[in-house]
């Protein structure tokens, strides 16, 4: 988990450096800015660095405060269910495609669960997640499962942190107009990273959930 936190710190540091480069008048002077003395440049640099540091700190604090439930909802844009909530519906419909197990083996393995799937959507999703978690509990300490989970959580938190950085950046423009200004390039970079990290999160989450199923289906043949 230490490596996971370091990756998040590196991401925030990269955002801070880009912020200083593209969104402040110290490293990237505004066209109408007057020529500055060395003292003024140093003072402005400290102010810009302080503002960037505050934004980064707020993102870090919010990332620690926001619970996994809200992070998952943000990642799913409040409409896309997590893979664990629909895993057995996908298996029964033949839509759970993975090269580590066959659909037929999975259907046979989880016949009882599939037969007892509730009709109500909310109840069904809660039931599927509960049953999947029971399976995950037996394999949570296996190295491949641990690694897959770390990759999924890293991508998820990268997405959430990027979204928070975008929001705080836009707020900083409104509140600290003399210190920072709107950068189209910076906003595009953040938005692209947000989109890519969201896609990566869903792919890693699917790989993680399917990995648990693959391990369980093939359990008898794994030492």
Image: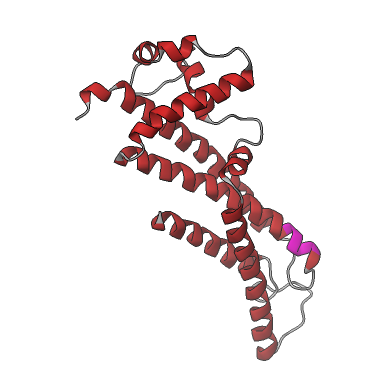
The answer to whether 64 is drawn above or below residue 27 in the figure is: above
Q: Let me know if residue 50 is in the magenta part.
A: no
Render colour scheme: secondary structure
The structure residue drawn at horizontal position 73% and vertical position 84%, both measured from the top left corner, is 35
Seen in the image, is 58 located left or right of residue 127? right
Compare residues 2 and 163 and report the one nearer the observer: 2
User: In the picture shown, does residue 46 fall above or below 166?
Assistant: below
**Residue 36 locus on image (x, y percent):** 72, 86
Dividing the picture into quadrants, the one containing residue 4 is: bottom left
| Residue 171: in magenta span | yes
Query: Magenta residues: mostly which secondary structure?
Result: helix
Q: How many marks?
A: 0
Look at the picture and state if 30 lies above or below 170. Answer: below
- Residue 112 at x, y = what percent? 43, 11
Q: Is residue 86 visible?
A: no
Start and end of the magenta stretch? Answer: 170-174
Residue closest to the far left:
223
Q: Is residue 74 visible?
A: yes
Residue 74 as seen in the image, left or right of residue 114: right
**Placement of 134 over or under 172, stated as above or below:** above
Q: Quadrant of residue 74?
A: top right
Q: Residue at x 50, y 11 (%)?
A: 116
Foreground residue, 97 or 42?
Answer: 97
Q: Residue at x 57, y 67 (%)?
A: 17
């Amino acid at each position: 988990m230490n490596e996971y936190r370091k990756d998040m710190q590196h991401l925030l540091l990269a955002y801070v450096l880009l912020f200083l480069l593209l969104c402040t008048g110290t490293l990237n002077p505004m066209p109408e800015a007057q020529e500055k003395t060395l003292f003024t440049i140093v003072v402005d640099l400290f102010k810009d660095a302080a503002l960037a540091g505050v934004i980064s700190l707020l993102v870090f604090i919010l990332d620690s405060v926001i619970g996994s439930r809200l992070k998952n909802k943000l990642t799913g844009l409040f409409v896309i269910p997590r893979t664990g909530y629909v895993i057995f519906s996908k298996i029964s419909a033949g839509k759970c495609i993975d090269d580590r197990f066959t659909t037929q083996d999975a259907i046979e393995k989880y016949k009882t669960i599939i037969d007892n799937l509730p009709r109500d959507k909310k109840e069904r999703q809660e039931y599927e997640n509960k049953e999947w978690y029971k399976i995950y509990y037996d394999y949570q300490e296996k190295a491949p499962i641990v690694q897959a989970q770390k990759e999924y959580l890293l991508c998820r938190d990268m997405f959430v942190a990027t979204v928070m950085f975008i929001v705080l950046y836009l707020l900083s423009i409104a509140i600290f107009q003399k210190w920072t200004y709107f950068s189209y390039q910076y906003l595009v970079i953040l938005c692209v990273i947000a989109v890519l990290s969201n896609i990566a999160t869903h792919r890693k989450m699917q790989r993680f959930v399917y990995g648990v199923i693959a391990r369980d289906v093939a359990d008898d043949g794994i030492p």
